[in-house]
Amino acid sequence: DATFGPIIMFGLGGIYVEVMKDVAFRALPINRREIMSMVKQIRAYPLLLGVRGEEKKDVDSVVDSIIKVGAIIQKCKRISDIEINPLVVYENGKGVKAVDVRILITNVKKGA
């Protein structure tokens, strides 16, 4: 973001983002406590805790993934955008899997 610098957006994806606009944002750098606050901020957060017979999801692995993406963005200033969609979140303790990742790199000016 030209005004705020690098930012992270988190949401559960699908209709939760597209229709309900259920997302949360934070500026980088960001720590684990701030990421957990961001994850808890979305209205769909209770789904990660397990509802209607579903097991609790591995929220710690989601937080770890956001920390790692933030670190990559901070290290590589040429990254203009990273999108992970979907990030499959397994049952608690079983991790996550990035099924599709898109990384956009800005052009380097000659002589810079």
Image: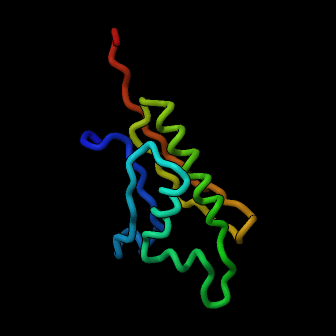
Query: Which residue appears at 54% of the width and 49% of the height?
Result: 101
Query: Which residue appears at 45% of the width and 65% of the height?
Result: 11
How many numbered marks have been drawn onto this rendered protein structure?
A: 0
The x and y percentages for residue 37 are: 47, 63
- In front here: 32 or 75? 32
Q: Quadrant of the C terminus?
A: top left
The x and y percentages for residue 70 are: 50, 44
- Please identify the residue farthest to the top as the structure is shown: 111
Q: Is residue 112 above or below residue 71?
A: above
**11 left or right, relative to 53:** left
Q: Is residue 28 above or below residue 14?
A: above
Query: Which residue appears at 41% of the width and 43% of the height?
Result: 81
- Please identify the residue farthest to the bottom as the structure is shown: 52
The x and y percentages for residue 8 are: 42, 51
- In front here: 31 or 24? 31
Query: Which residue appears at 37% of the width and 26% of the height?
Result: 107
- Please identify the residue farthest to the left as the structure is shown: 3
Hey, which quadrant is residue 2 in on the image?
A: top left
The x and y percentages for residue 44 are: 47, 76
Q: Quadrant of the N terminus?
A: top left
- Please identify the residue farthest to the front as the structure is shown: 33
Q: How is the image coloured?
A: rainbow
